[in-house]
Image: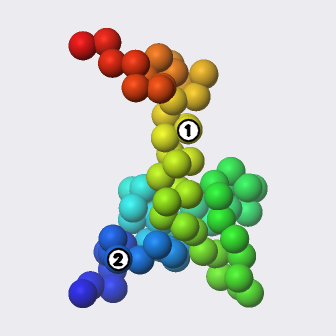
Amino acid sequence: MSGTNPSHDHEILTLEEVALYLRLKPQTIYKWAQEKRIPAVKLGKEWRFRRSVLDRWLDEQMLSDDSGFSHLRDGNDQA
């Protein structure tokens, strides 16, 4: 088990694991957490993230009205 990759066994992720998961810089995740732009909780001095909430948040970002992809919501396949 590697300590550098977010494991699918872990529902609770560290800031560094979220950065790897979303392929962003840790500084970006830290800033977004402070600004409440990404769902997170501060436990003591450390930020923690729930994988299932992040996945839902990411879907909401992708499918929001101003994303240009809102037509993909609710399983409306246009195949």
Q: Secondary structure at mark 2?
A: loop
Q: Quadrant of the N terminus?
A: bottom left
- Can residue 25 be seen here? no
The front one of 51 and 67 is: 51
Would residue 29 appear left or right of 69 to someone viewing this image? right
| Figure quadrant of the C terminus | top left
- Amino acid type of the residue that numbered disc 1 sits on in the rendered structure: Glu
Q: Identify which amino acid the numbered label 2 is placed on.
A: Asp
Q: Position of residue 17 (x, y in %)?
A: 44, 72
Q: Name the quadrant containing residue 53.
A: bottom right
**CA separation in Å, label 2 and label 1:** 23 Å
Q: Is residue 73 left or right of residue 48?
A: left
* Residue 21 falls left or right of residue 35: left
Q: Which residue in the structure is indicated by mark 2?
A: 9
Q: What sort of colour scheme is used for the picture?
A: rainbow
Q: Sequence-wise, which precedes: disc 2 or disc 1?
A: 2
Residue displayed at 40% across by 26% down: 75
| Residue 54 or residue 2, whichever sits in front | 54
**Which residue is under mark 1?**
60
Q: Is residue 10 among the parts visible in the rendering?
A: yes
